Amino acid sequence: MEERLLQLSASFAINICAYAVMSNHYHLVCHIDKAKALSWSRDEVIERWQSCHKTLPMIIERYLNGEQLGESQMMFSTKLSNNGAKDYTAQ
């Protein structure tokens, strides 16, 4: 558990302030570095996601393979890749 928390913290703009792991649950206090997350490019967000997950959404795979995406597909891939930087930061 501790190893995974540290991996995620290193891959994303999350600072672990405190944590406690019990036998059946855990407590986590973290700070999301909004400025750092918003400074990442689309490709950097994808790279960071890929460092922690085995697979990517198919549309992101197509983007990375240089396939021509339609306007709506490109908007969707942008929304997917921006989720890591924008939708999960405190407003």
Image: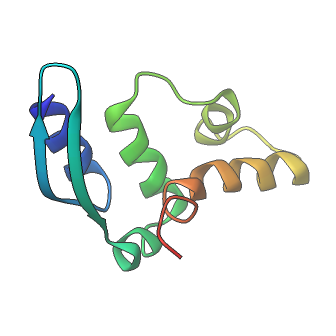
Is residue 68 rendered to the left or right of residue 49? right
Give the image quarter of residue 54. top left
40 above or below 11?
A: below
15 above or below 50?
A: below
Badge count: 0
Q: Nearer the viewer, residue 81 or 18?
A: 18
| Residue 36 percent coordinates (x, y) | 34, 74
Q: Nearer the viewer, residue 20 or 36?
A: 20
Is residue 69 rendered to the left or right of residue 89? right
| Residue 58 percent coordinates (x, y) | 67, 27
Q: Nearer the viewer, residue 85 or 32?
A: 32
Give the image quarter of residue 25. top left
Residue in view at x 42 percent, y 56 percent: 44
Residue in view at x 48 percent, y 47 percent: 46
| Residue 12 percent coordinates (x, y) | 32, 54
Residue in view at x 55 percent, y 65 percent: 86
Residue in view at x 11 percent, y 33 percent: 21
| Residue 67 percent coordinates (x, y) | 73, 38
Colour mapping used in the image: rainbow
Which quarter of the rendering shows the N terminus? Answer: top left
